[in-house]
Amino acid sequence: MIQINQLYKSFGTNQVLKGIDLNLDKPGITAILGPNGSGKTTLIKSILGMVLPDQGHILFDGKPIHKKWAYRETIGYLPQIVRFPENLKPAEMFALIKNLRGQNPDLQHLINRFELEPFLQKRLGNLSGGTRQKINLVQAFGFDSKVLILDEPTAGLDPVSVIELKKLLEEERKKGKIILLTTHIISFVEEMAEQMVFLLDGHIHFKGDQKTLKSTFGDDRLERAIANILRKDAINQSEPEKII
Amino acid sequence: MLKIFRFYFFDLIRSRWTVLYALFYLLLTSALLLLSPNLSKVIISLMNIVLFLVPLIASMLGIMYFYSSRDFIELLLAQPLRRSTIFFGQYLSIVGSLGLSLLLGIGIPFLLYGILSSAEIWNYLVLLGTGLMLTFIFSGIAFWIALKHENRIKGFGLMILCWLFFAVIYDGLFLLGLSWFNDYPLEKFALGASLFNPIDLSRILILLKLDIAALMGFTGAVFSKFLGSGLGMLISMASLLLWVGFPIWRIRAISLKKDF
């Protein structure tokens, strides 16, 4: 479905992605992990055509996405932090996205799930960060798309809404969707993701399922296994100094 | 593009700033019309305010709005749309809302006054037209700067500098230059130089239309002397149109290459 070949991207002198190869074909949840600034968001935005790669290419459904836009109608996207236009109401924003996508799905069940009904006719500028994130979730999940790309879906959500989000992800997984998400919350990954991609300094350091990760890095707790990747990397980096 | 335009337009016309802007013009124009019985004098007073205020407001509100909608653009970019659709939709919405404020604010009092049956109708329309052109030009420049510079402080600084340059500094330098080199024949130079300032061009256009030599200033006088009113107006109008096109061309070029 999504095929990434030798992707390079730099912003000024900062080389963010240094040759990423990634195939996303199987339905299910793939988590992209990595420390801040490791290129997670850049990778996601490249798939959406928002960041234009320096080298390499991305195929969606076998076709290169460069300078194309129609392929995005099969992708649902949840951006990271969103400030919506201040003077409009959530209902109007949903209407716009329905209009732009040319679909008219019933968003009511999602609105009920996240208890957004009382906010639908309020100004977006007056809503709290958590409420805006819920509205963001409704627009990302509400449309019939084969691929879901979620950038930090849990950001700003209260525990009840996180549970609701997990249920929602479970349902979407059962529908056979390809779901790609980034997060820093390891327990969330442990519970939800079957596949993991670990990004560090613009390279993919690990790619595979949880079992492999745990056995490769010798710990049965995901958090520790991930810490081991980082530590191993630290050792690799300090080795040249030892030689000197 | 129409969908994006409509969406942003409805956001903008509900904004406090747009309403204030329209009300200001409404009050100002009504007051001027009540105080002075001479329509062409009212048009000249309005011209001085419009030429100063329209570029300032279009610059400031334009850049403010583009920066504050930066996050939402990311969401729009993930929709099945062309990039140019998004950016031109947004650009037109800001031009549309500011233009509408201007049109209503200056339009309603004149309509009530009975401009339609007056001899000044064309002069009035030229004033309105240049106001709209300046809205296009300066919100275009604002959008261009906002796209080019992610750093908001830098963007704002550049925009203020840009407005200051065209509204104040340019004329100052111009006059300085003329007084330094007043032994040389500078008419043609002055003629050419005024083409590079949209605010000057607008002033010349209105004054040529009103045909008031005394108020024309140096460049205006040169325009009417060398080109006559008709050709002078044609040239200044064509240059204004080029000025409208320039930022649009830049917006298109940058938006196609930019990473978000």
Image (cartoon, coloured by chain):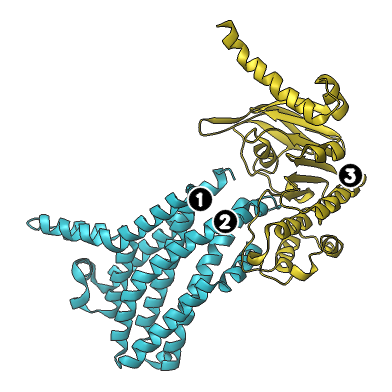
Chain colours: A yellow, B cyan
Quadrant where the image shows the N terminus of chain B: bottom right
Quadrant where the image shows the C terminus of chain B: top right
Tell me the residue at 80%/21% (across/down).
Answer: A217
- Secondary-structure class at tag 3: helix
Q: Residues within 10 Å of mark 1 (few under 14, many from 20)?
A: many
Tell me the residue at 25%/57% (across/down).
Answer: B193
> What residue is shown with label 3?
A173
> Circles 3 and 1: CB distance less than 8 Å?
no
Q: Which mark is residue B87?
A: 2
**A164 horizontally vs B97: left or right:** right
- Relative vertical location of residue B22 with respect to residue B151 in this rendering, above or below: below
The one of A14 and A128 positioned closer to us in this rendering: A128
Horizontal and vertical percent position of residue A215: 86, 21
Are the numbered discs 3 and 2 placed on the same chain, yes or no? Answer: no
- Relative vertical location of residue A225 with respect to residue A61 in this rendering, above or below: above
Q: Amino acid at mark 3?
A: Arg
Horizontal and vertical percent position of residue A176: 90, 43
**Mark 3 and mark 1: Cα distance apart in space:** 38 Å
Q: Chain of mark 1?
A: B
